Image (spheres, grey):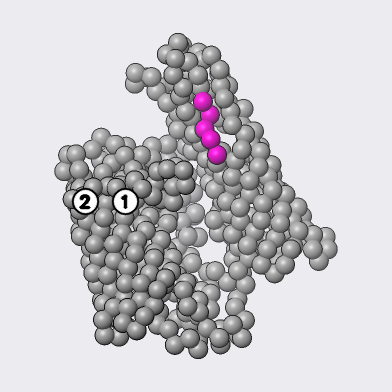
Amino acid sequence: MHRNKRITLLAIYFFTLLVPALAQDNRIQYPTGLRNAYFGVNIGYINYPFSMQQLEPGFTADGVTVPHVAVRLVLYGLPINKYLSAKITYMRPVNWVQYRNVNGDLQNHSVWMNIAGLTLQGRLPLSKKISVSGEAGLGVITRNGFEINGVPVVKNANYGTGLFGGAIQYHLNKKWDLQLSTAWTPEHKKTRQPHTLFIAGGFNYNLYPLSKEKIERNTKTGLSFPKHFLMAGYTTNALGYGVNDAVSKGPVPIFWGGDAHVKSGFSVSYQRNIFHARKVFAMDWGLHTGIWKSRDKGETIFTLSLNPVLRFNAVRSRNADFFLEYAVAGPTFISKTKVDNVPLGRKFTFHDFMGIGVFAGKEKRIVGGIRIAHYSNGNLFPQNDGVKIPLTFNLGYVLN
């Protein structure tokens, strides 16, 4: 089982790495891994009948609340030919299952789950606008249960299974497809995980190669997009974690926190531009390594990450270009599975960061910025408490 899970993860992240790995030097055209790719969002009804059967012997509850709204994302889809495509998906309920008053403790206890998928989808056109499709492949189900006084009540689970589905699609235009879809996973008796049925409506967004006319317009702006640059960073919690908390809490969180806190650290990062639009948007891939010291016990942590980075050149001037950056789900090796007694899952995790920066100086060769960061495994494993990285101050040089 452990070997199968590793194979599943390697397959999923192979597709993640495919995008930057196939990048060409023609940075005003989509890189090879993104041409004709698609991304999607589906929202709808999920049925996963949790009940008293998931409780371990000796435990009872007054009731179980099972929310029925869920989201399924197509993180990356790539057509193989006109009729067949491969895709990576992620599905989870919006809210978690709640067990109430277990053995009279007057508490609510959460059980969360999600399903990652690596599937093939066959498509049959019925007309120029309408098509039907079927889907089958590998699903990885992760469930995080709960304990009372150190005794498991609903156990954790993490296993591979079949993932099947279908859809009816309406081709709205070249970029947008609307669809009604369904997805299903079978019951897993060994872990007492119920079956899952998802019925939803949503859309796919298609990336087609840019036209020659648009490429020509993009080349005539006279604006610079550095090809690659190197930075060193120093991390400190001297100013606290206020920025992290401000963007990860509240009514509309746009980032993540973490139960393990880094006190200080040193990092080195390299970024290479693989695509840029006319004025504002740029996409980089980056290699990042860091050595961190935890806040509570002073433990040393080492990380090595490969990051897809989205960069937005917000303000341009003669002597400086200011930008915003956001990186998400960078595959990462982390040297510890527990930091300050906080469980992180496995030594495979993800690196996310967001920040502001500037290219300045003669020919805008100096690059600097401030970031916050986060490590967690995206609930691929039951234990996923995460690591919070406070302000990091970066300074570097544009190499080209």
- Residue at horizontal 42 percent and vertical 40 percent from the top: 381
Let me know if residue 356 appears in the view: yes
Relative side of 160 to 270, left or right: right
Which residue is outermost to the left?
298
Residue 95 included in the magenta stretch of the image:
yes
The CA distance from mark 1 to mark 2 is: 9 Å
- Which numbered dot is residue 243? 1
Q: Is residue 285 visible?
A: no
Verify CB contact (< 8 Å) between mark 1 and mark 2. yes
Image mark for residue 229: none
Give the amino acid at mark 2: Leu
Q: Which residues are magenta?
A: 94-98
Q: Quadrant of residue 185?
A: top right
At x 55% / y 39%, what residue is drawn? 94
Report the number of numbered marks.
2
Q: Position of residue 116 (x, y in %)?
A: 53, 46
Image location (x, y in percent) of residue 277: 50, 76
Amino acid type of disc 1? Val
Percent position of residue 62, x then y: 53, 14
Classed neighbour count for the residue bearing mark 1: other residues with Cα under 10 Å, few (<14), some (14–19), many (≥20): few
Report helix, strand or loop for mark 2: loop
**What's the residue at 67%, 52% (across, down)?**
202
Name the residue beneath numbered marker 2.
239
Q: Nearer the viewer, residue 289 or 189?
A: 289
Which residue is located at x 63 percent, y 62 percent?
205
